[in-house]
C-alpha cells in the first residue's frame, strides 16, 4: 500500500511544478514562446486540479486504515499520475487529441485507473459489509 504514498508525492510534485509553470507563463510572458510553448492554459489548469485530486485520492485510500489489494494500489498510483499527465501533454501539443499514440495512452490510462479505483471500491465495500 505504500505505493499510494509514492503516487501521492509524485502528484504533489507535478501539482507544484504545474503551478510554477502557469505562474511564470502569466507573470513573465516571453515574446515568441508564450502561446507556442504552453498553447492551452485552460487544459493546464485541468491538469493542475486533477493532480491535486489524484494526490488526495492516493492519500485518502492509504489512510483509510484497511488492507487494500496490491494491484489496485499500483493501478491507482499509476493511473492517478497518468490521467492528469494526459492534460499536461495536451496543454503543450495543439494537435494532441488527433494523435493515435495519445489516444492509446489515454485509453490505457483510463483502463488502469478504472481497475485501481474499482479494486479499492470493492475492497472498501467488502470491509463495510
Image: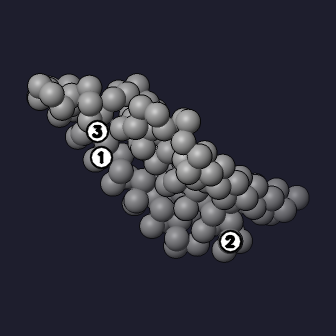
Can you say which quadrant of the picture contains the N terminus?
A: bottom right
Could you say where residue 25 lies in the image, as x and y percent from the top left?
Answer: 21, 31
Eyeballing the image, is 46 above or below 51? above
Q: Report x, y in % for residue 103.
A: 60, 45
Q: Does the image show residue 45?
A: no
Residue extending farthest to the right is 129
Q: Mark 2 and mark 1: span between their CA atoms? A: 28 Å
Residue contact between numbered discs 3 and 1, judged by CB atoms under 8 Å: yes
- What crowding class fits label 1: few (fewer than 14 Cα within 10 Å), some (14-19), or many (20 or more)? some
Q: 106 left or right of 128?
A: left
Residue depicted at x 21% and y 28%: 34
User: In the rendered image of this protein, does residue 85 appear above or below residue 66?
Assistant: above
* Mark 3 closeness class: few <14, some 14–19, many ≥20 residues within 10 Å: some
Residue highlighted by disc 3: 19
Toward which corner of the image does residue 23 lie, by quadrant? top left
| Of the pair 82 and 74, the residue shown nearer to us | 82
Of the pair 63 and 122, the residue shown nearer to us: 122
* Classed neighbour count for the residue bearing mark 2: other residues with Cα under 10 Å, few (<14), some (14–19), many (≥20): some
Residue 43, quarter of picture = top left
Q: Is residue 89 visible?
A: yes
Reading the image, the residue beneath label 1 is 16
**x, y (%) of residue 120?**
71, 59
Compared to residue 18, the image places residue 71 above or below, namely: below
**Left of 79 or right of it: where is 114?**
right
Q: First in sequence, mark 2 or 3: give its number.
A: 3
Q: Secondary structure at mark 2?
A: helix
Residue 105, percent from left and from top: 58, 52
Q: Secondary structure at mark 3?
A: helix
Q: In the drawing, what numbered circle is on residue 71? A: 2
Q: CA distance from mark 2 to mark 3?
A: 31 Å
Amino acid at each position: 500500500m505504500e505505493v499510494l504514498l509514492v503516487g501521492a508525492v509524485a502528484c504533489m510534485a507535478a501539482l507544484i511544478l504545474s503551478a510554477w509553470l502557469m505562474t511564470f507563463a502569466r507573470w513573465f510572458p516571453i515574446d515568441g514562446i508564450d502561446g507556442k510553448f504552453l498553447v492551452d492554459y485552460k487544459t493546464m489548469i485541468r491538469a493542475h486540479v486533477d493532480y491535486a485530486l489524484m494526490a488526495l485520492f492516493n492519500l485518502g485510500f492509504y489512510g483509510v486504515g484497511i488492507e487494500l489489494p496490491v494491484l489496485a494500489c499500483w493501478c491507482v498510483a499509476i493511473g492517478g499520475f497518468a490521467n492528469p499527465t494526459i492534460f499536461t501533454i495536451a496543454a503543450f501539443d495543439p494537435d494532441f487529441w488527433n494523435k493515435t499514440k495519445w489516444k492509446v495512452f489515454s485509453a490505457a490510462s483510463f483502463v488502469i485507473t478504472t481497475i485501481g479505483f474499482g479494486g479499492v471500491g470493492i475492497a472498501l465495500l467488502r470491509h463495510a459489509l
